């Protein structure tokens, strides 16, 4: 996999190589990403970054400043800031700017803020992804890991091993009494009984890329598990 974050890729490769697959969750029906409808809802609060991701993103926004400007993006001086979300996440994350998401997006979660990641383009594409594609690289070359696997999630299983899963409203790890989840609430992460397809089919590209990192054929493993039932 082509990536600007080799250390991050190496750590993820180790996780993927050991991960168990939550087959039942990966068969839940969801719909493909539809940016024209959701306007980048999953990007509303930016994304938490590894140290390597943060440093690399700072560097490319300087080195490729003209490219971002040509895309119509007016980036702030600080594209990476310190963030904290409850007791779950803290550290560097992409900065955000105000955006009228509740007015722009139908069914925008009421507990989500009216903000956008500073790398979100006016047409709701990710500028980091667009720049990579314009340069003939992998679409996710500059894109943070947590972004491109969304809405997939790694959690710790009962035996301590990582588990690859698709959170539902009942299992979303970012759920609190006043905050009913994150990935399960975004348009592409919502379980959709009508009109949806099994998540492992909708997220085929993401699963193939994860499998490549961990030297596994995750799609084949899922299909074999389903055939054995």
Image: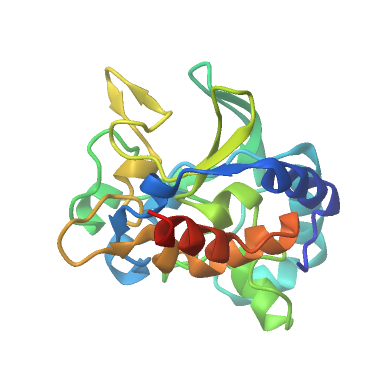
Q: How many marks?
A: 0
- The structure residue drawn at horizontal position 84% and vertical position 54%, both measured from the top left corner, is 6
In the depicted structure, whether residue 20 falls above or below residue 103: above
In the depicted structure, whether residue 15 falls above or below residue 221: above
The percent position of residue 42, horizontal first and vertical second, equals 42, 50
Residue 202 falls in image quadrant? bottom left
Of the pair 103 and 206, the residue shown nearer to us: 206
The percent position of residue 91, horizontal first and vertical second, equals 66, 28
Residue 173 falls in image quadrant? top left
- The structure residue drawn at horizontal position 66% and vertical position 47%, both measured from the top left corner, is 79
In the picture provided, is 93 more to the left or to the right than 152? Answer: right
Quadrant of the rendering where the N terminus is positioned: bottom right
Question: How is the rendered protein coloured?
Answer: rainbow
In the depicted structure, whether residue 142 falls above or below residue 182: below
Residue 215 falls in image quadrant? bottom right
In the picture provided, is 156 more to the left or to the right than 173? Answer: right
- The structure residue drawn at horizontal position 42% and vertical position 45%, both measured from the top left corner, is 166
The percent position of residue 106, horizontal first and vertical second, equals 18, 56
In the depicted structure, whether residue 2 falls above or below residue 75: below
In the picture provided, is 31 more to the left or to the right than 66? Answer: left
- The structure residue drawn at horizontal position 18% and vertical position 51%, both measured from the top left corner, is 107
| Residue 9 appearing in the image | yes
Of the pair 203 and 185, the residue shown nearer to us: 203
The percent position of residue 154, horizontal first and vertical second, equals 56, 39
| Residue 114 appearing in the image | no
Residue lying farthest to the left in this orientation: 194
Of the pair 58 and 170, the residue shown nearer to us: 170
In the picture provided, is 215 more to the left or to the right than 170? Answer: right
């Amino acid at each position: 996999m082509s990536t600007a974050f080799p250390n991050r890729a190496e750590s993820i490769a180790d996780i993927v190589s050991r991960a168990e697959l939550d087959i039942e969750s990966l068969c839940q029906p969801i719909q493909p990403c539809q940016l024209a409808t959701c306007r980048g809802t999953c990007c509303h609060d930016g994304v938490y970054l590894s140290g390597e991701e943060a440093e690399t993103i700072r560097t490319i926004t300087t080195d490729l400043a003209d490219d971002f400007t040509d895309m119509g993006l007016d980036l702030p001086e600080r594209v990476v800031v310190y963030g904290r979300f409850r007791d779950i996440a803290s550290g560097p994350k992409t900065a955000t700017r105000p955006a009228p998401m509740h007015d722009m997006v139908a069914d925008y979660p009421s507990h989500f803020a009216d903000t956008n990641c500073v790398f979100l383009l006016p047409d709701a594409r990710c500028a980091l992804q667009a720049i990579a594609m314009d340069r003939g690289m992998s679409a996710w070359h500059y894109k943070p890991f947590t972004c491109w696997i969304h809405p997939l999630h790694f959690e710790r299983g009962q035996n301590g091993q990582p588990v690859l899963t698709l959170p539902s409203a009942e299992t979303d790890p970012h759920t609190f009494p006043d905050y009913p989840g994150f990935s399960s609430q975004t348009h592409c992460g919502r379980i959709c009984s009508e009109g949806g397809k099994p998540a492992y089919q909708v997220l085929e590209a993401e699963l193939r890329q994860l499998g490549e990192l961990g030297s596994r054929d995750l799609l084949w493993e899922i299909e074999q598990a389903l055939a054995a039932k």
